[in-house]
Amino acid sequence: EVQLVESGGGLVQPGGSLRLSCAASGFTFSSYWMSWVRQAPGKGLEWVANIKQDGSEKYYVDSVKGRFTISRDNAKNSLYLQMNSLRAEDTAVYYCARVDEWSGYSFDYWGQGTLVTVSS
Amino acid sequence: EIVLTQSPGTLSLSPGERATLSCRASQSVSSSYLAWYQQKPGQAPRLLIYGASSRATGIPDRFSGSGSGTDFTLTISRLEPEDFAVYYCQQYFTFGGGTKVEIK
């Protein structure tokens, strides 16, 4: 059974940093692109970042470029999101999602999400 | 940058009725990369449809997708109580704003 379990969310002050983790199991982690997708309270879904299977390619939404870094450790079946210079508008539930190239780069499995709150 | 516009914003229907949700792209997109998701309150999104018309694993056949170019549709043939939720379309890194299907 595919499982994605996020952790690391919490309350942080504006300008602060947080590192999110996503533990993957039930599939060959190193064979898939992985993504972070966020959802602000009461709002829609927003893709945040993607990383290729070997970590050689990374893509970000413009609003987080230069502040967030996506990474992965295939030996540990883990995905990460380092978030620096956090802003109030980064407040959201952050989901880890598996990208399925064979179904048109859809997000076929999602974690339960971890809440990040940026507030003083 | 492609923008996906979903309509209507809210659809008020009764169980057993047919739901038709629209997703319009700001420019032509490949149907191979158009997906639909369902999200219930407090839950993660769930993949329903990929490639515009292929159902994901375990998705009931009352859910169907169609369309090409700039216009795509998600149809729920007969609404079940568990289908009342928010639905999003997605193409690559872009999501639509969502359509809420609520009980009338």
Image (cartoon, rainbow, N blue to C red):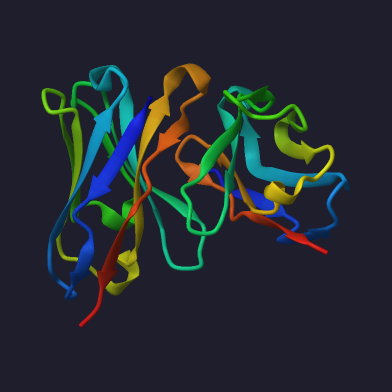
| Image quadrant in which you'd find residue A40 | bottom left
**The C terminus of chain B - image quarter:** bottom right
| Depicted A77 relative to depicted A111: above or below | above
Residue A63 is situated, as x and y percent measured from the top left of the image, at 32, 57
Q: Quadrant of residue A51?
A: top left
User: Where B98 falls versus A26 (above or below)?
Assistant: below
Left/right of residue B77 with respect to residue B102 in the rendered view: right
The percent coordinates of residue B77 (x first, y second) are 84, 37
- Residue extending furthest right? B17
Q: For this view, does B23 lie left or right of residue A99?
A: right
Q: Residue at x 12, y 68 (%)?
A: A16
Left or right: B101 as drawn, with respect to B18: left
Q: Which residue is at a point 34% across and 69% down the rendered structure image?
A: A89
Q: What is the quadrant of residue A18 in the picture? A: bottom left
> Where in the figure is residue A102, as x and y percent of width and height?
47, 16
Please state which of residues A24 and A72 is positioned toward the viewer in this rendering.
Answer: A24
Whole-percent x and y of residue A79? 21, 37
Compared across the picture, whether A79 is left or right of A99 comes to: left
- In the image, residue B90 sits, relative to residue A26, either above or below, namely below
Specify the farthest residue to the bottom: A120
Q: Residue at x 37, y 27 (%)?
A: A2
Number of numbered discs visible in the structure rendering: 0
